[in-house]
Image (cartoon, grey):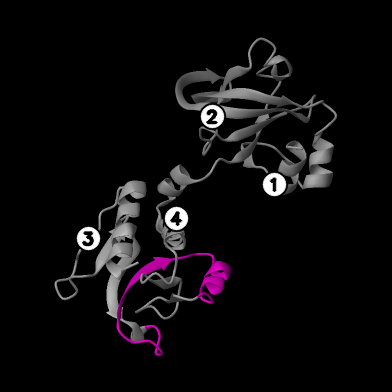
């Protein structure tokens, strides 16, 4: 594979997946091209042509390199042990790598590192949009809603939407006292449904639709068990599900 063909493949990949076109910013370096986010303008990739000796004193000639940023330092250290991957050119310390685009590193591996760099440099809002589906533990108060019989007549219902919850997330519904147990596993099928509900201290501005996937017996995941086995001593709002509890709930 030629240098130019892999450079072009990177550009095509960034355009297709992220809608990004290369930007040529320097007249003195006409081959250097930046890939950056549209919202925060941070670079997630920089392709430039350099002489090989700038990153490897044992090699000669010119080579294209892709500079990417990683935040996982353990992964960065592992990648640096692989052929064709070096500390970032111009940035000898920090979290940037230079990946040669001469065929030494397979295209799939190059694209994966570009994806990691995109995630590492993305804005908080974009990271939330591109994150994989997540599991949540959410509370319900029997004083306001008959949660025990919530799915008696339909397998999909409207529910108050918590901050950060998105379509395809999984929610486990915990019923407060006197039930004090996890009752349901549901999938989020729709979000951001407008709502204007006020009753005492309860205000609901957005709803989501959740579909029932599984029921749990009242004695399976009680408040006492959540604390003693999984370290959860309060469920006051939507919270991430620990791996240990996720494993138990999904068995």
Q: Residue furthest front?
A: 1
- What kind of element bears circle 1? loop
- Quadrant where the image shows the C terminus: top right
Mark sitting earlier along the chain (4/2): 4
**Closer to viewer: mark 3 or mark 1:** 3
- What kind of element bears circle 3? loop
Q: Residue furthest top?
A: 153
- What kind of element bears circle 2? loop
* Percent x, y of residue 34: 27, 63
Could you give the CA–CA distance between mark 4 and mark 1, rounded to whole angstroms?
Answer: 23 Å
Mark sitting earlier along the chain (3/4): 3
* Residue located beneath label 3 in the image: 23
Residue 23 versus residue 39: which sits nearer the camera? 23
Could you give the CA–CA distance between mark 3 and mark 4, rounded to whole angstroms?
Answer: 19 Å
Q: Residue furthest left?
A: 27
Give the extent of the magenta segment. Answer: 55-82
Image quadrant where residue 120 sits: bottom left
Q: Residue at x 84, y 38 (%)?
A: 224
Q: How many marks?
A: 4
Could you give the CA–CA distance between mark 3 and mark 1, rounded to whole angstroms?
Answer: 42 Å
- Quadrant where the image shows the N terminus: bottom left
In the rendered structure, does residue 74 fall within the stretch colored magenta? Answer: yes
* Percent x, y of residue 235: 69, 37
- Dot 3 alpha-carbon crowd within 10 angstroms: few under 14, some 14 to 19, many 20 or more: few
**Closer to viewer: mark 4 or mark 1:** 4
* Residue located beneath label 4 in the image: 119
């Amino acid at each position: 594979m030629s240098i130019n063909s892999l450079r072009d493949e990177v550009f095509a990949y960034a355009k297709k997946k992220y809608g990004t076109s290369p930007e040529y910013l320097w007249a003195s370096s006409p081959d250097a091209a930046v890939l950056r986010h549209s919202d925060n303008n941070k670079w997630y990739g920089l392709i430039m042509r350099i002489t090989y000796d700038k990153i490897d004193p044992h090699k000669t000639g010119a080579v294209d390199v892709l500079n990417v940023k990683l935040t996982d330092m353990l992964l960065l250290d592992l990648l640096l042990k692989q052929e064709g991957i070096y500390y970032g050119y111009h940035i000898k310390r920090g979290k940037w790598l230079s990946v040669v685009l001469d065929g030494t590193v397979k295209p799939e591996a190059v694209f994966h590192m570009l994806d990691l760099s995109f995630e590492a440099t993305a804005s908080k809002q974009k990271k939330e949009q591109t994150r994989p589906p997540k599991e949540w533990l959410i509370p319900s108060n029997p004083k306001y809603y008959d949660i025990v019989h919530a799915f008696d007549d339909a397998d999909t219902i409207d529910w108050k939407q918590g901050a950060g919850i998105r379509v395809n997330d999984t929610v486990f519904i915990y019923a407060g006292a006197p039930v004090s147990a996890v009752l349901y596993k549901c999938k989020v099928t729709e979000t951001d449904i407008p709502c204007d509900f006020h009753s005492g201290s309860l205000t609901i501005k957005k709803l989501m639709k959740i579909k029932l996937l599984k029921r749990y017996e009242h004695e399976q995941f009680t408040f006492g068990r959540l604390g003693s086995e999984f370290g959860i001593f309060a469920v006051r709002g939507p919270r991430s599900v620990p791996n240990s509890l996720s494993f138990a709930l999904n068995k």
